[in-house]
């Protein structure tokens, strides 16, 4: 009986620490966004509403959310995972699939490393294919076609529709 109580206390502490770590991560991400937003170049065209407005709003929102979550957790309002009654396909009793987390993390790392060199379209298509593989898809050709179409469509939307320059990379002169 005493062993079970000890385990419950350890589980409660671990859950508290995990929620505080999440709050700290959100807060740090918000601070990073605010810090890096200052690096965005301003041009004379951006007279009233410049390119820094939305990142400052997002960064401020992340800082606010991280602080709010930390205060909530420290007050004892730790969100309890439900038994999945609201979810259609999530079983909260299953352990985390670290292989999937690792593959998706690797996809993000590949994207980060390739976005400037290979360009937006290639890096985004690879991100899509690797993330889909990590989540269980084994249809590489289909995923590659979808990834290229989605990333090329997003590229055209941003560059032509919004006049936002994205890196062309290896496709410079083709796009």
Image (cartoon, rainbow, N blue to C red):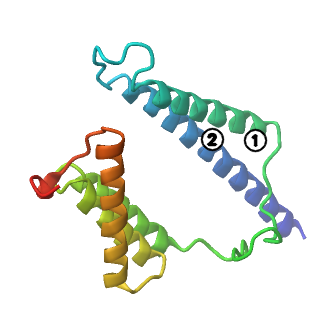
Q: Report the residue marked by disc 1.
A: 73
Q: Quadrant of the C terminus?
A: bottom left
Compare residues 94 and 63 and report the one nearer the observer. 63
Residue pictured at 67% horizontal, 77% vertical = 94
- Give the side of residue 2 with respect to residue 161, left or right: right
Q: From mark 2 to mark 1, how far is it between C-alphas?
A: 9 Å
Residue at the left extreme, as displayed: 173
Residue pictured at 58% horizontal, 35% vertical = 62
Horizontal and vertical percent position of residue 161: 35, 44
Q: Report the residue marked by disc 2.
A: 23
| The image quarter in which residue 122 lies | bottom left
Q: Residues within 10 Å of mark 2 (few under 14, many from 20)?
A: many
| The image quarter in which residue 51 lies | top left
Count of numbered circles in the view: 2
Residue pictured at 9% horizontal, 53% vertical = 173
Compare residues 63 and 138 and report the one nearer the observer. 138
Compare residues 144 and 112 and report the one nearer the observer. 144
Horizontal and vertical percent position of residue 143: 37, 77
Residue pictured at 15% horizontal, 53% vertical = 169
Q: Quadrant of the N terminus?
A: bottom right
Compare residues 115 and 96 and report the one nearer the observer. 115
Measured along the vertical axis of the image, is residue 157 above or below residue 152? above
Point out the tag, 2 or 1, that comes first from the N-terminus.
2
Query: Mark 2 falls on what kind of element?
Result: helix
Q: Residues within 10 Å of mark 1 (few under 14, many from 20)?
A: some
Query: Mark 1 falls on what kind of element?
Result: helix
Residue contact between numbered discs 2 and 1, judged by CB atoms under 8 Å: yes
């Amino acid at each position: 009986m005493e062993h079970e109580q000890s385990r419950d206390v350890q589980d409660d502490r671990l859950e508290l620490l995990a929620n505080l770590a999440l709050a700290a991560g959100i807060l740090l991400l918000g601070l990073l966004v605010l810090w890096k937003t200052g690096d965005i170049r301003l041009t004379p065209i951006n007279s009233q509403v410049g390119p820094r407005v939305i990142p400052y709003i997002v960064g401020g929102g992340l800082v606010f959310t991280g602080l709010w979550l930390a205060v909530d957790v420290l007050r004892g309002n730790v969100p309890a995972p439900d038994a999945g009654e609201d979810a259609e396909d999530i079983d909260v009793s299953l352990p985390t699939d670290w292989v999937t987390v690792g593959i998706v993390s690797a996809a993000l790392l590949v994207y980060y490393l390739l976005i400037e060199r290979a360009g937006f379209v290639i890096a985004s298509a690879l991100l899509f294919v690797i993330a889909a593989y990590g989540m269980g898809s084994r249809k590489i050709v289909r995923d590659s076609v979808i990834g290229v179409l989605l990333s090329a469509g997003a590229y055209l939307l941003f560059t032509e529709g919004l006049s936002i320059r994205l890196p062309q990379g290896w496709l410079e002169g083709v796009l």
